[in-house]
Image: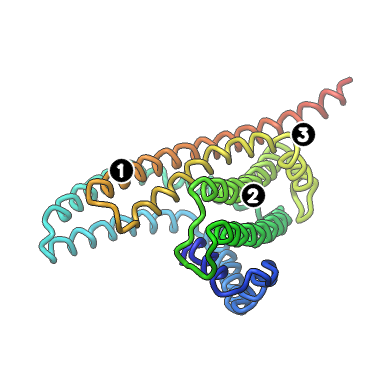
Amino acid sequence: MKIFDVCSHLHTQHQLTIPLIIIIIINTTQHTSVTLIAAASSFTLSTISLTLMTTCPKFLIQLSLLFSLLLSLLITATSFYYQQYIAGAFGVLFFLMSCCYACCVWRRIPFAAANLNTGLTAVKRNGGVFVTSVWITVVSFGYLVVWMVAMVGVYDATAATAGVEGNTNVQPSWGYLFLLLLALFWTQQVFQNTIHVIVAGVVSTWWFAPDEASSCCSVAIKDSFIRATTCSFGSICFGSLLVAIIQTLRSMVESARHDSSNDGCAAFVLCLVDCLLQCLQGILEYFNKFAYIYGESYNVILCVIALPSSWTKI
């Protein structure tokens, strides 16, 4: 169920006189056990995957590459089995392209495995970065609850303005939806990119000055957190805003695509727009990651290496 459907359900199942925060708490605590099980499972799977990547990174990269080839071949065979010859022809084309890609990059797998192992070693030696990431994730979840409260409030205000009560067809205007979605995606992107910058700063410090990043609660974690939330926070917010705008537009386009009143031509155009927005989002996210890593590495070189050595010489 989509988040808007959840908010609409909360609005129609309770009177307007009940405090909205109590509604959210009641509906959240009903699924507390499921949430705790999901959190424990994700933590366990993350620990197992981290251990496996550290133990055999080369084998995992080779396995993922071969799995993509096998999956492409399986899709092609299934298409021909159900006499979908056009889909099967595209499947053959993508399978051949995947084979060419695998042949080109196979000799680079040891280098990729060495890079992966190096990064994991840096993160394992600074275990406090996991605690920082979990703390930021908890804060992000708290913001999500507050956002849902605001969303229910918008539904209440919309219903009160329309003069109806208990009507599931009442929907806020597109302007309100755009701003609410933008606030949600922007904040989530900021949290996510803040964690990304903190990890990049810790790994960079471990690489250039390993003495300062060799313990669970090393100085590098504190310094990276301070840099990410102060001097680098403006760049994080700006890059996150660009991606959040695209995500908001994509969400609204997808909502319009699922509207049953659209004809085939409109659905086709919306599908193309969604595809273009998805490509643009991928490009922005790629450049954001590169820019954050490069900027944080430069900050580490400047603050951790250059300035102390300069003061030492003076």
Q: Earlier in the sequence, mark 2 or mark 1?
A: 2
> Helix, strand or loop at disc 2?
helix
State whether residue 116 is above or below residue 168.
above
State whether residue 56 is above or below residue 298.
below
**Dot 3: within a 10 Å radius of its alpha carbon, few (fewer than 14), some, or many (20 or more) residues?**
some
- Specify whether 181 is left or right of 217: left
**CB under 8 Å between callouts 3 and 2?**
no
| Nearest-to-viewer mark from 1 and 3 | 1
Residue 290 drawn at (x, y percent):
54, 36
Could you say which is closer to the camera, residue 154 or residue 235? 154
Q: Earlier in the sequence, mark 3 or mark 2?
A: 2
The residue drawn where x is 49% and y is 39% is 286
Task: State the separation of the CA atoms marked 3 and 2.
Answer: 25 Å
**CB under 8 Å between callouts 1 and 3?**
no
Residue 226 drawn at (x, y percent):
77, 42
Q: Which residue is mark 1?
A: 272
> Helix, strand or loop at disc 3?
helix
| Nearest-to-viewer mark from 3 and 2 | 2
| Nearest-to-viewer mark from 2 and 1 | 1
The residue drawn where x is 65% and y is 76% is 26
Which amino acid, mark 3?
Val
Q: Name the residue at the top extreme.
A: 314
Q: Is residue 118 visible?
A: no
Q: Which residue is mark 3?
A: 304
Residue 269 drawn at (x, y percent):
28, 43
Residue 12, image quadrant = bottom right
The residue drawn where x is 76% and y is 56% is 216
> Helix, strand or loop at disc 1?
helix
**Dot 2: within a 10 Å radius of its alpha carbon, few (fewer than 14), some, or many (20 or more) residues?**
some
State whether residue 282 is above or below residue 95.
above
Q: Which mark, by number, is residue 191?
A: 2
The residue drawn where x is 68% and y is 35% is 234
